[in-house]
Amino acid sequence: MQSITGSGLPNSHQALLRNQHLLSGRLALLGVASAYLLPELPFSGLAMSEHAGVFRALAQHEKWQACFGYDDPVLADNSFDSVVVFLPKARAELEMRLALALSLASEGARLVLVGEKKEGIAGAIKQLRSVAPQAFKVDSARHCQVWCAEAIEPAPGFRVEAWLGWSRIECSGISVDVAGLPGIFSQDGLDNGTRMLLETLAEQPVRADRLLDFACGAGVIGAWIQAHQRAQEKPVASVDGVDVQSQAVICARETYRRANSAGTIFASDGLAGIDGSWPAIISNPPFHTGVKTDTSMTEQFLQDVKRHLQPGGELRLVANSFLPYEALIKRYIGRVERVREDGRFTVYRSFRGQ
């Protein structure tokens, strides 16, 4: 086995490098977490990430075909001799990722599954063997396991629409149908933080004809706001949305389509790839990376938001009360008030100065 290079890479990527002798022919990598993997491999092929920032970095490597998530048009049936699946953080997503892998595989292709023990690779083997009973463990390294299945049976015709599910959420008398895909935040229903935010929007509406929903997820907030405004027979605002994850962007667009909502859904890692300004910005931002608390995305958002918020415009944000957002909002935007709090969540409001 070759020595491990690329020590700055995630453990799963280092484990693949250690076992790159398993790779041959046309190569597809599904679930890449770091573009620094690509120059370490003496191959070219397709590299898919569902993270908009990683996708942009992958696109900088000319030998590779970058792919954003599960509905990218570059995904071609039966085109690859080796397909690598990196274990996703959400177990529910693995079944969908394996289905995509089988659709990409050529006749007699090799399937490789790589994942960290702490992310549940041991439990994922049952899912792997349900589609590739011949799979066997090749290596344990870097707190990861590497599994391989030879001569897998291709299954062409993957369509992400087939994995869409629908649920109905209700808040303040307004119901909205919400699209779901494996691995996205909103799939388990309306969370308590978003519910509190929506209740404040019902009681104290944002005065704006255009809004931006940052970290929009499946589009719940935008679709609900517009449905509430229609029910109140008030002018309906356009609500744009931005999210970093492919599945969220797909679901938000589907939610908007079913609800006949107005607004554009963008894929972006934070606000870095977004142009324009809005008279109001709302958000229930994430604070987890996997199982770890990670507020860096929201901190960067609060640093960037002022240039996207029009003078006099409102920022309204809900967050777990223990997170240090009140001081950050005050620092980057201005005076901040607590619209509501219940011990667990707090809804903050701040207006940009002229």
Image (spheres, rainbow, N blue to C red):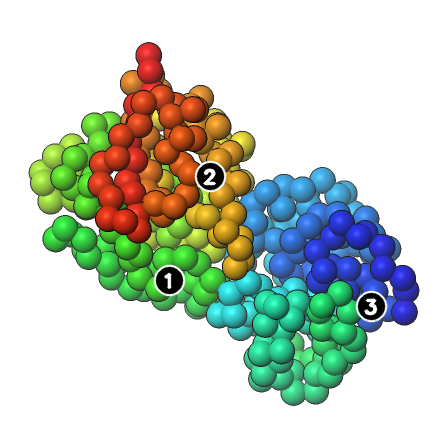
Label 3 with label 2: CB-CB less than 8 Å: no
Distance (Cα) linking label 1 and label 2: 21 Å
- Residue 152 in the image: above or below residue 166: below
**Closer to the camera in the image, 203 or 278:** 203
Q: Residue furthest bottom?
A: 133
Does residue 264 appear to the left or right of 261 in the view shown?
A: right
Which of the image's four quarters has the C terminus? Answer: top left
The label on residue 298 is 2
Distance (Cα) linking label 3 and label 2: 37 Å
Dot 1 or dot 3, earlier in sequence: 3
Dot 1 or dot 2, earlier in sequence: 1
When asked about the image quadrant of residue 113, the answer is bottom right
Give the residue type that dot 2 points to.
Thr
Residue position marked by numbered label 3 in the rendering: 19
Q: Residues within 10 Å of mark 1 (few under 14, many from 20)?
A: some
Give the residue type that dot 3 points to.
Asn
Q: Which of pointers 1 and 2 indicates the residue nearer the eye?
A: 2
- The percent position of residue 37, horizontal first and vertical second, equals 76, 52
Dot 3 or dot 2, earlier in sequence: 3
Q: Which residue is depicted at the point 21% across and 28% down?
A: 207
The label on residue 123 is none
Residue position marked by numbered label 1 in the rendering: 187
- Residue 213 in the image: above or below residue 141: above
Answer whether residue 125 is visible to the viewer in this image.
Answer: yes
Give the residue type that dot 1 points to.
Gln
**Closer to the camera in the image, 192 or 38:** 192
Q: Secondary structure at mark 2?
A: helix
Which of the image's four quarters has the N terminus? Answer: bottom right
Q: Secondary structure at mark 1?
A: helix
Q: Which residue is depicted at the point 90% across and 64% down?
A: 2
- The percent position of residue 244, horizontal first and vertical second, equals 50, 45
